[in-house]
Amino acid sequence: MTSNVHFYEPRNGHGLPHDPFNAIVGPRPIGWISSRSADGILNLAPYSFFNAFNYTPPIIGFASIGAKDSLRNIQQTGEFVWNLATRALAEQMNASCAAVPPEVDEFALAGLTPVASRLVGVPRVGETPVAFECRCTQIVQLQTAAGETVPTWLVLGEVVGIHIDRSLLKDGIYDTGAAGHILRGGGPADYFEIGAEQLFKMYRPK
């Protein structure tokens, strides 16, 4: 009897043209992370594994697959900034993920403006409407079910300062649909944009 379900064990490969895992867990928010090395060199890089994990205090996190510059910078300074990637900034965000040496400043590479943060020593992207200033709380190297470490690090940070363009606050409520959030999809070049047309309301049962 044939089955309409494609089943595979990830350790043995998926047998498809592109790994479906990322497409299924998504679209995902983009962790557009700015950091600064101990020597003062700026770095800006997008991460497709990113999310929020706690309300009070607010804690966000991203996964660095491989020991990349952002990870090393945060290990050195304990600080970073998350910058909202929007449709208007999509090309600049994409430019900032170029594989360049650590001494290259991706702010300059992408034509973006570093603006001093208020509470941390890492600048935010001046062009973005939203930014979170963060202090690192944990860096956890991931491991398999068998306890073997993998070369991926989860970087968690407490959000200590939030910048929001006032135009996105409608009657005191953040207008997600108006901000132009972009999200990472599953294909090698797939992104999605959030707009007002995707909005629907559903209240929790009392």
Image (cartoon, rainbow, N blue to C red):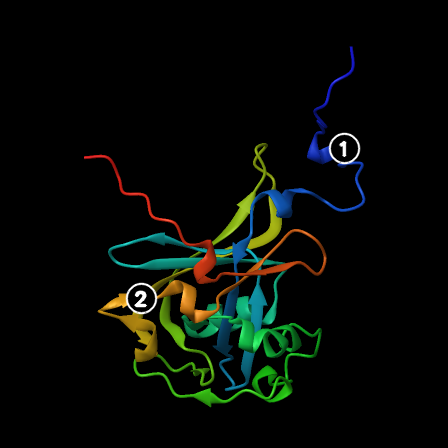
Q: Which mark is residue 164?
A: none
Disc 2 crowd, CA 10 A, few/some/many (<14, 14-19, 20+): some
Front-most of residues 156 and 77: 156
Quadrant in the picture for residue 115: bottom left
159 relative position to 31: left or right:
left
Q: Please report the residue visible at 43 percent of the width from the left and 73 percent of the height from the top.
A: 81
Q: Is residue 156 above or below residue 130?
A: above
Q: Which residue is mark 1?
A: 12
Quadrant into which the C terminus falls: top left
State which mark lies toward you, 2 or 1. 2
For the image shown, how many numbered marks are present on the structure? 2
Q: Are marks 2 and 1 in contact (CB under 8 Å)?
A: no
**Secondary structure beneath disc 2?**
strand
Q: Position of residue 120 (x, y in %)?
A: 35, 79
Where is residue 48 drawn, in percent x and y? 57, 59
Extreme residue in the top direction: 1
Q: Residue at x 37, y 69 (%)?
A: 134
- The residue that mark 2 highlights is 174
Q: Is residue 106 above or below residue 24?
A: below
Left or right relative to 117: residue 33: right
What amino acid does circle 2 point to?
Tyr
Q: Give the residue displayed 51% in from the left and 79% down from the top.
A: 37
Rendered view: 135 above or below 6:
below
| Residue 83, x across and y down, in percent | 46, 73
Q: Is residue 161 visible?
A: no
